[in-house]
Image (cartoon, rainbow, N blue to C red):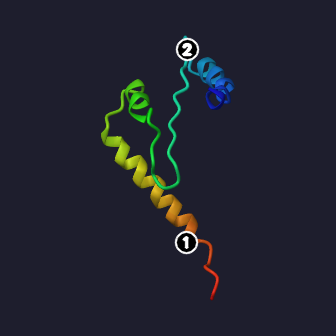
Amino acid sequence: MEKVSKYLDLAHEITAMWNVESTVVVPIVVSVNGLLAKSFDQHLKKLSLGCWIKGRIQKAVVLETARIVRRFPTPEP
């Protein structure tokens, strides 16, 4: 719940900006190696997103992690 509370100010700002009655903070947590939180599918349903996006999110995270790792040279033995 602590992580969700960090975004409440943003949720209030979006509510005012888009002139809607309310907003909901939906946490999407993906580790650097593409592992998903157990609650990931529930959160996708709240966003009305199909499960097809799960693979795309994992792929994007793994590719970005690889890009970051490649930027750092490995030490010579």
**Position in image of residue 31 (x %, y %):** 52, 49
Q: Which mark is residue 22?
A: 2
| Residue type at the position of mark 1 | Arg
Relative to 67, is 49 on the left or the right? left
The residue sitting at 40% across, 54% down in the picture is 59
Q: Compared with residue 29, is residue 77 higher up or lower down, i.e. above or below?
A: below
**Position in image of residue 17 (x %, y %):** 61, 22
Q: Which mark is residue 70?
A: 1
Q: Quadrant of the C terminus?
A: bottom right
User: How far, Cα to Cα, is label 2 from label 1?
Assistant: 42 Å
| Residue type at the position of mark 2 | Ser
Q: Dot 1 lies on which element?
A: helix
Relative to 76, is 31 on the left or the right? left
Q: Dot 2 lies on which element?
A: loop
**Total numbered labels:** 2
**Position in image of residue 19 (x %, y %):** 57, 15
The residue sitting at 63% across, 32% down in the picture is 3
* Mark 2 Cα-neighbour bin, 10 Å: few <14, some 14–19, many ≥20: few
Closer-to-camera residue (28/18): 28
Locate residue 15: give its quadrant.
top right
Q: Quadrant of the N terminus?
A: top right
